[in-house]
């Protein structure tokens, strides 16, 4: 881990000993020879000691010329490729959004100002694609990637990333009334085609399964017949398909049954079925609304499972069925409004008001 100072022989012959600048040479952790022209001998010796210290401490930064595009390709190959499919798609989509909006160029040029400018622009995107929850999710992916860039020596300092304050809104979930309307409207479904059963039956199977299990949509679509034990009423969710990155056995309600996998265009078809059911949800956010603001997403089926079953289940049972690592996550899906309603109903009512109500 040694650096040395020297004068270039060609410069020395041309400028003489007094006019020739001093340089520092060293080998980086990858074994590549590096050098840098500094100026005076004292400054060169000081820089050499600095390089030796970085090499010894394992904090040497070996490439300040790496571009964002080059890093993104390397990150996808070395890091993202080992992630589950859904996580990999989400991470790479977030990093590509950052590249498209921030246009970082050189990786080492990414500063806190770059992140702040990205956040300001990202928040203006309409519909569900620009909310605080979505932006924070992308920021977590960006922060993780920049930490790797720092570890690889491409980024001198990881910039500060200010997460957005997420509003404490009541979670939206599919109500029993709306679920019944959507279930009936499945007759309007046009795909999937070419199956031994109708598109309406396929959709009713998918919606019932999601509503009665609380599984994420990716887990639902990844389910295979071999993972089902209908006699025991159990199903296996595979580590490759779920967010917890582990195999798990889950009990199923008797009304649940499987279906065939189909392409991701089911989001569009789901919105069309809701339109046929007369679903038009209000959007309380102050932004440019899109059609996605006024319909349920598949995750709202998951929230419905947690919200509607929370009063009848223990916290441990709900956490197990939702497959959350932390109960703090499970709590986010509990309908606080329902709990408050029970508390309000038990409040003391003055006699005069009780008589008036009667």
Image: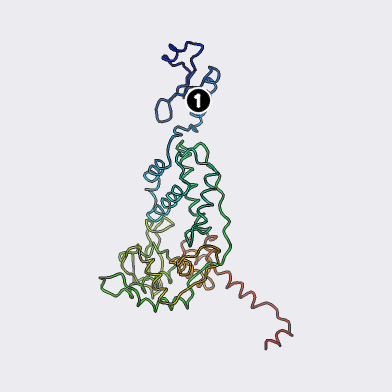
Secondary structure under tag 1 reads helix
Give how far across and how far down residue 142 sits, in percent.
Answer: 48, 48
Q: Position of residue 204 (x, y in %)?
A: 37, 74
Which quadrant would residue 220 be assigned to in this image? Answer: bottom left
Depth order, front residue of 329/123: 123
Residue for point 44% across, 57% down: 244
Q: Is residue 349 above or below residue 31?
A: below
Q: How many marks?
A: 1
> From what the image shows, is residue 155 above or below residue 139?
above
Q: Residue shown at 37%/56% (left/top)?
A: 240
Q: Residue at x 51, y 52 (%)?
A: 121
Quadrant location, the C terminus: bottom right
Residue under pointer 1: 52
Left or right: where 122 falls relative to 84: right
Residue depicted at 30% across the width and 64% down the height: 226
Give 67 or 49, whichever is nearer the viewer: 67
- Residue 83 x %, y %: 39, 51
For label 1, count other residues whose C-alpha is less than 10 Å away and answer few (under 14), some (14-19) or many (20+).
some
């Amino acid at each position: 881990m040694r650096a040395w100072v020297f004068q270039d022989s060609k410069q020395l012959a041309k400028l003489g000993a007094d006019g020739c600048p001093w340089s520092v040479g060293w080998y980086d952790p990858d074994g590549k020879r590096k050098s840098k022209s500094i100026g005076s001998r004292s400054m060169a010796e000081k820089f050499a000691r600095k390089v030796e210290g970085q090499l010894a401490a394992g904090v040497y930064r070996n490439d300040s010329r790496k571009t964002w595009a080059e890093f993104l390709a390397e990150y996808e190959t070395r890091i993202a490729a080992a992630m589950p499919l859904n996580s990999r798609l989400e991470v790479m989509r977030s990093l590509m959004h950052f590249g498209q909006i921030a246009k970082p160029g050189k990786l080492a040029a990414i500063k806190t100002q770059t992140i702040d400018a990205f956040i300001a622009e990202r928040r203006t995107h309409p519909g569900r694609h620009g909310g605080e929850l979505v932006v924070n999710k992308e920021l977590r992916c960006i922060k993780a990637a920049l930490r790797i860039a720092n570890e690889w020596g491409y980024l001198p300092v990881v910039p500060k990333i200010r997460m957005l304050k997420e509003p404490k809104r009541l979670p939206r979930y599919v109500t029993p009334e709306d679920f019944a309307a959507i279930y009936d409207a499945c007759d309007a479904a046009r795909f999937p085609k070419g199956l031994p059963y109708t598109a309406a039956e396929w959709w009713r199977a998918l919606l019932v399964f999601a509503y009665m299990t609380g599984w994420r949509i990716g887990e639902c679509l990844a389910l295979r017949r071999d993972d089902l034990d209908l006699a025991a009423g159990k199903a296996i969710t595979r580590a490759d398909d779920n967010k917890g990155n582990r195999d798990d056995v889950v009990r199923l309600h008797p009304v649940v049954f499987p279906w065939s996998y189909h392409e991701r265009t089911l989001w569009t078809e789901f919105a069309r079925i809701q339109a046929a059911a007369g679903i038009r949800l209000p959007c309380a956010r102050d932004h440019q609304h899109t059609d996605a603001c006024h319909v349920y997403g598949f995750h709202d089926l998951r929230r419905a499972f947690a919200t509607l079953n929370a009063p009848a289940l223990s916290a441990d049972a709900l956490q197990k069925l939702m497959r959350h690592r932390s109960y703090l996550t499970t709590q986010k899906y509990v309908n606080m409004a329902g709990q408050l309603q029970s508390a309000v109903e038990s409040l003391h009512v003055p006699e005069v008001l009780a008589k008036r109500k009667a």
